[in-house]
Image: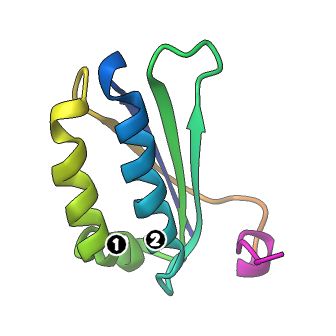
Amino acid sequence: MIVRVIRVHVKPEYIEQFETATRANHEGSLSEEGVLRFDVLRNPEGRGEYLLYEVYANHAATETHKQTSHYAVWKETVAEMMARPRESESYEVVAPTGRAAWKVSEA
């Protein structure tokens, strides 16, 4: 499994629009077969800082995600909202193991 952590800094005047666009991307991403989690976190200090925490079944799923229409729409929509370029890091999962430990279930 692969975890991608993306740090995003949004211009203050775009926070509401960013969150709306990102929620749509979140929903679309969770419908992808290889996406196990797609969390959107906001800094509670309210400075337009966000962390996207994405868990994929494998590297191929990360590439498939980047080819989806919802990601393309999100990327284009939020481009002007960025206070600075996104920062991204990828990690391999050591624990927990198994898809069931990561998969978001609908309650």
Local SS, label 1: helix
Q: Tell me if I can see residue 101 in this picture.
A: yes
Identify the residue at image location x=29%, y=64%. 71
Q: Tell me if I can see residue 11 in this picture.
A: no
Residue 64 located left or right of residue 72:
right
Residue 86 located left or right of residue 76:
right
Which residue is denoted by mark 1 in the rendering? 65
Q: Is residue 48 above or below residue 21?
A: above
Residue 83 located left or right of residue 102:
left
Q: Residue 79, located in which quarter of the rendered image?
A: top left
Q: Judge the density around disc 1: few (<14), some (14-19), many (≥20) Cα neighbours within 10 Å.
A: some
Q: Residue 37, located in which quarter of the rendered image?
A: bottom right
Give the residue type that dot 2 points to.
Answer: Ser
Image location (x, y in percent) of residue 96:
79, 63
Image location (x, y in percent) of residue 30:
54, 73
Name the foreground residue: 29 vs 54: 29
Identify the residue at image location x=27%, y=76%. 68
Q: Main secondary structure of the magenta part?
A: loop
Q: Is residue 39 above or below residue 5?
A: below
Query: Given contact means CB atoms under 8 Å apart, are the residues at marks 1 and 2 in contact?
Result: yes
Quadrant location of the C terminus in the rendered image? bottom right
Sequence-wise, the earlier of marks 1 and 2 is: 2
Image: magenta residue range: 98-107
Image location (x, y in percent) of residue 58:
48, 76
Mark-to-mark CA distance, 1 and 2: 7 Å
Identify the residue at image location x=69%, y=58%. 94
Image location (x, y in percent) of residue 43:
59, 23
Give the residue type that dot 1 points to.
Answer: His
Which residue is denoted by mark 2 in the rendering? 29
Q: Judge the density around disc 2: few (<14), some (14-19), many (≥20) Cα neighbours within 10 Å.
A: many
Q: Is residue 88 magenta?
A: no
Q: Is residue 101 above or below residue 75?
A: below
